[in-house]
Image (spheres, helix red, strand yellow):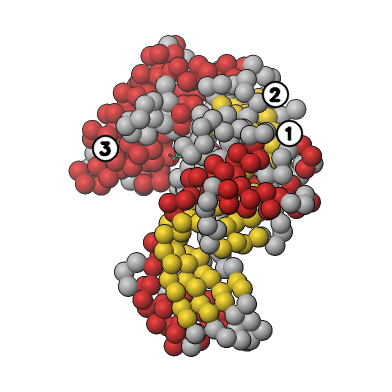
Amino acid sequence: MIKVCKFGGTSMASGMTFRRVKEILSGDPSRRYAVVSAPGKRYGGETKMTDLLYAAHACLKKTGSCGAPFEKIRTRFQGVSDELDLGKSLDVDALLDETEQEIARRNSEAFTVSRGEYLAAKLMAAYWGAPFLDAADLIVFGEDGALDGETTDQRIASALGERERAVIPGFYGADKEGNVVCFPRGGSDISGAIVARAVCADLYENWTDVSGFLVCDPRIVENPAQIGRLTYRELRGLSYMGASVLHVETLFPVREAGIPICIKNTFRPSDPGTMIVKSRRTEEGSAITGIAGKKGYTAVAVEKTLMSGGLGDVRRMLEILEKNGIPFEHMPSGIDAVLFLIESGYLGGGKREKVVREIEAAVSPDRIRVLPGLALVAAVGQGMRGNVGVSARIFEAVARTGVNVKFIDLGSLGQDLIFGVDEGDFERTIRAVYEEFFIR
Ligand code: ASP
């Protein structure tokens, strides 16, 4: 059994959290490979290590030295080393001096900002007593800037095949010339998924500071239920609608390989967490797995007699949106009517008037209305597909609170039902659906 464990920034924030991580790793011999983030915040208002490194790089460009930001970086790593009494196994001052010189010599933003993960992994390896393996030697990017998955898999499989345990920094790799290349922010999740796939792990554990996914946002519903198991498809639905623990796009490597992921809480390790799996039996859960939503939408509603069954009108309107760089999120339609749901931010700076004028010229509608201030609410869950009456229950619950539903979009796969309400009704709509399905 092989588990690859990724630890996020809050798990790497201080000597105390390093201790927890070591306990977690040592508590299960199948937890063989750790992929770590850079130290995050110890308290609200503190700056994350990666942000300090961006500041150090800006300072280097301006003044020729990493200056005050690097002094803060130095103090934080020295603090972790002192707390853990690492002096005997690691000369942290020499490591920091060397890192500062190398940052100045390379003068590359990607190299500089990757040093948070690099240093955290060096310290964790010394503390856990496992080898450090540099991600720059394992994760390979091609000339086009995209990950070279095949070479990466080979390098990781051969390096880790020989080792019982290892610590690997997340967030970066290197191109074929050895120049460091970073993933997007938050990218250590991707590194962990790549390592898990390359070693054919049985489980990818993603350790963070929450005990997995909740059915809905705890800022809206007090103490909502935990989601025990969800599929990748459901995860996509929930993250698309704003649930932010983990984004499905970062997990493609493990998804492809069918490796399950478990979201675990470093600060409550015995909580079961949330398992993300390829498929699950619907009886295991409620008809709905999660409820999510987002405010800040505008609907552009176009009506034209005989548009239904006609040819080309919708294509012309979509082309207008595309030419103006405006993505649409949903497009519910009715008889001789279609609604484009757009994030309101895309319609600023005169775009809204421009789009309306262009649609009028292109399709001569009978009526075109722009309705701002909408929120989208999504009930997500594969259980909706086979259960009769789920949407009836949703809308009955919403109706009981006196909220008016503005439009409905039932995803064709029947795994998510999305509907729109006024922004002012958003919170009570989510609460109503939650209570209907989870408080009984
Ligand atoms: N340290 C990087 C960031 O802050 C990557 C990560 O933590 O996943 O974005």
- Kindly identify which numbered label has been placed on residue 30: 2
SS class, disc 1: loop
Residue 203 on image: x %, y %: 70, 33
SS class, disc 2: loop
| Residue on which the image places disc 1 | 202
Between 345 and 338, which is closer to the camera in this rendering? Answer: 338
Identify the residue at horizontal 35%, vertical 30% (top origin).
44
Q: Is residue 77 left or right of residue 267?
A: left
Report the number of numbered marks. 3
Q: Is residue 200 left or right of residue 422?
A: right
* Circle 2 Cα neighbour tier, 10 Å, few/some/many (<14 / 14–19 / ≥20): some
Is residue 303 visible in this depiction of the protein?
Answer: yes
Identify the residue at horizontal 48%, vertical 49% (top origin).
426
| Residue on which the image places disc 3 | 66
Furthest residue in direction left, as rendered: 63
Q: Amino acid at mark 1?
A: Asp
**Mark earlier in primary sequence (3, 2):** 2
Question: Which label sits in the foreground, 3 or 2?
Answer: 2
Q: Ligand 1 quadrant? A: top left
Q: Amino acid at mark 3?
A: Cys
* Residues at marks 3 and 2, CA–CA distance in whole angstroms: 40 Å
**Mark earlier in primary sequence (1, 2):** 2
Residue 108 on image: x %, y %: 36, 47
* Residues at marks 1 and 3, CA–CA distance in whole angstroms: 42 Å
